[in-house]
Amino acid sequence: GQQVMQIPQYQHVQEGEDFTTYCNSSTTLSNIQWYKQRPGGHPVFLIQLVKSGEVKKQKRLTFQFGEAKKNSSLHITATQTTDVGTYFCAGRDTTSGTYKYIFGTGTRLKVLA
Amino acid sequence: GAGVSQTPSNKVTEKGKYVELRCDPISGHTALYWYRQSLGQGPEFLIYFQGTGAADDSGLPNDRFFAVRPEGSVSTLKIQRTERGDSAVYLCASSPGYDTQYFGPGTRLTVL
């Protein structure tokens, strides 16, 4: 079945440093979503990417969807303590006849002030 | 407006008991998802409703798990003969269509 892996599993950065998490699917995706989950909280939607090679920016966050639509990345420029949390990607398989999403394993980000 | 709500927020039960977890989605959202999240893991897909029907229940672990959404709004996840391995946070999410999922706060289920 479809599997979605993320690396790294954990990342500790000094405030102001950049951060990147990578998401890799075993199958081709129709679209990919990114979520942020604060400690003790629930996932909060960040963005959705649909097109091959798509790049979207939200302030300090840059999201990319790979050309083959099997991988994606999230890059945060100049991290802040408010960026702390776990970042998940969630992909929908192109062979799926429904809107079922498989979540990645997540990358936990800690930002040291 | 009101977000997704889930009740109870915490449920402690004994092995072998039956539990029901409730999800109130955002009004007007046609899609509803149930996920299970264990500590340190990503949300694991259980079932997805489009309206009243279960469009995809391929994530339900076994026949002890069942979910309904009789009127296309509130949904109930039902777990029979609970096992210690069922302990997790059960998350519900609703969506107005096929993109953004709005998650509820979750129900933490502990099976003793």
Image: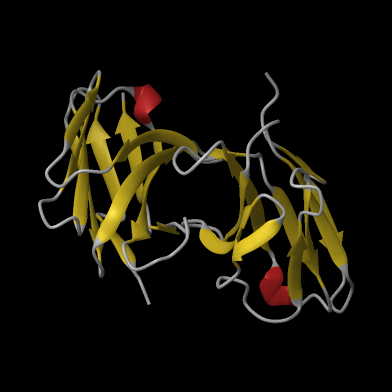
Q: Residue at x 81, y 54 (%)?
A: B70
Residue B4: quadrant of the picture: top right
Q: Is residue B72 left or right of residue A46?
A: right
Q: Percent position (x, y) of residue A70? A: 20, 59
Q: Is residue A103 left or right of residue B38?
A: left
Q: Is residue A94 left or right of residue B5?
A: left
Tell which of B70 and B15 is nearer to you.
B70
Q: Is residue B30 left or right of residue B41?
A: right
Residue B7: quadrant of the picture: top right
Taking B36 as reference, is A54 above or below it? above
**In what quadrant of the picture does the C terminus of chain A appear?**
top left
**In what quadrant of the picture does the N terminus of chain A appear?**
bottom left
Q: Percent position (x, y) of residue B36? A: 60, 60
Q: Percent position (x, y) of residue A61? A: 24, 27
Q: Residue at x 80, y 75 (%)?
A: B82
Q: Does the image show residue A40?
A: no
Q: Does the image show residue B88?
A: yes
Taking B40 as reference, is B58 above or below it? below
Q: How is the image coloured?
A: secondary structure
Taking A45 as reference, is B22 above or below it? below
Residue A30: quadrant of the picture: bottom left
Q: Residue at x 76, y 54 (%)?
A: B69
Q: Residue at x 70, y 23 (%)?
A: B2
Q: Percent position (x, y) of residue A39? A: 52, 39
Tell which of A41 and B61 is nearer to you.
B61
Q: How many marks?
A: 0
Tell which of B24 and B54 is nearer to you.
B54
